[in-house]
Amino acid sequence: MKRALIVVDVQNDFCEGGSLPVAGGADVASDIGELLHHWTRQDDHAPPYDVVVASKDHHVDPGHHWAKEPDFVESWPVHCKVGTDGEAFHPNLDPQPFDAIFLKGEHAAAYSAFEGRTVEGHALADWLRSHEVDRLDICGIATDYCVRCTALDAAKEGFRTRVLTDLCAGVAPETSERALAEMQDAGVTLR
């Protein structure tokens, strides 16, 4: 079986300068980008992942997920609107060496990459299984929201799941700590 890396929502709107920035988002984008590009430059040995995929918040009209007066729990400012620069991957990931990209949240709130689909309509869990993946490493933004939901869904789907905590940025220390504990309780390994 094979190992995959899932890069969760490393998009302009979730990094400094975006409409819903997470402190340290640009640094995480840089660290992930450097890691991905280091592997692609190595000719003498294979990278540690058989496939690398990414998720993107990809909102057209997500209903109550966007609000003029958001509560920052269930509603948020407009972010990752399709066709805007905020929806694009952070430039530190360019060129983007992804084997597949999973878009989520067009018309409803979506936090987990497992809610996403490729433009061809393939769901993440099905895509991973079709590529014989059984082990996942997860990184990205935000630890306490989309990374958390992705890791919990990965564990529910039966994948051996690890979160690369040094390649994640969270919205708040308290909620990030709770999210990490919840992931561990669900059988997710933290590294």
Image (cartoon, helix red, strand yellow):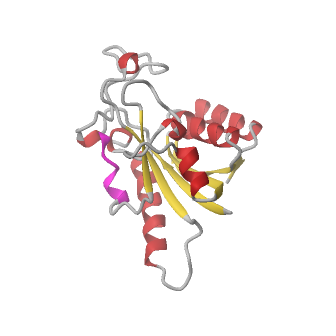
Question: Which is more toward the observer, 169 or 112?
Answer: 112
Taking the image as drawn, is residue 165 in sight? Answer: no
Residue lying furthest bottom: 44
Which quarter of the rendering shows the N terminus?
bottom right
With 50 as the anchor, is 181 left or right in this view? right
The residue lying toward the viewer, choosing from 190 and 121, is 121
- As for residue 90 lying within the magenta part, the answer is yes
Left or right: 4, with 183 as reference point: left
Quadrant in the picture for the C terminus: bottom right
Residue found at x 33% / y 44%: 12
Q: Position of residue 188 (x, y in %)?
A: 71, 45
Q: Is residue 175 visible?
A: yes
User: Which of 134/95 is in front?
Assistant: 134
How far across and down, in percent of the image, does residue 132 sit? 63, 59
Residue drawn at x 49%, y 72% as measured from the top left: 39
**Which residue lies most toward the top here?**
69
Q: Is residue 30 left or right of residue 3?
A: left
Where's residue 86, x and y in %?
28, 40
Residue 19 located left or right of residue 131: left
| Residue 55 is a magenta residue | no
The spot of residue 161 in percent (x, y) is 68, 49
Up-down relation of residue 33 to residue 108 (above or below): below
Instruction: Count the marks.
Output: 0
Which residues fall within the magenta stretch? 87-93
Q: Looking at the picture, does residue 133 appear above or below residue 173? A: below
Residue 188 lies, with reference to residue 74, above or below; the image says below
Q: Residue at x 31, y 40 (%)?
A: 87
The residue located at (36%, 23%) in the rendering is 62
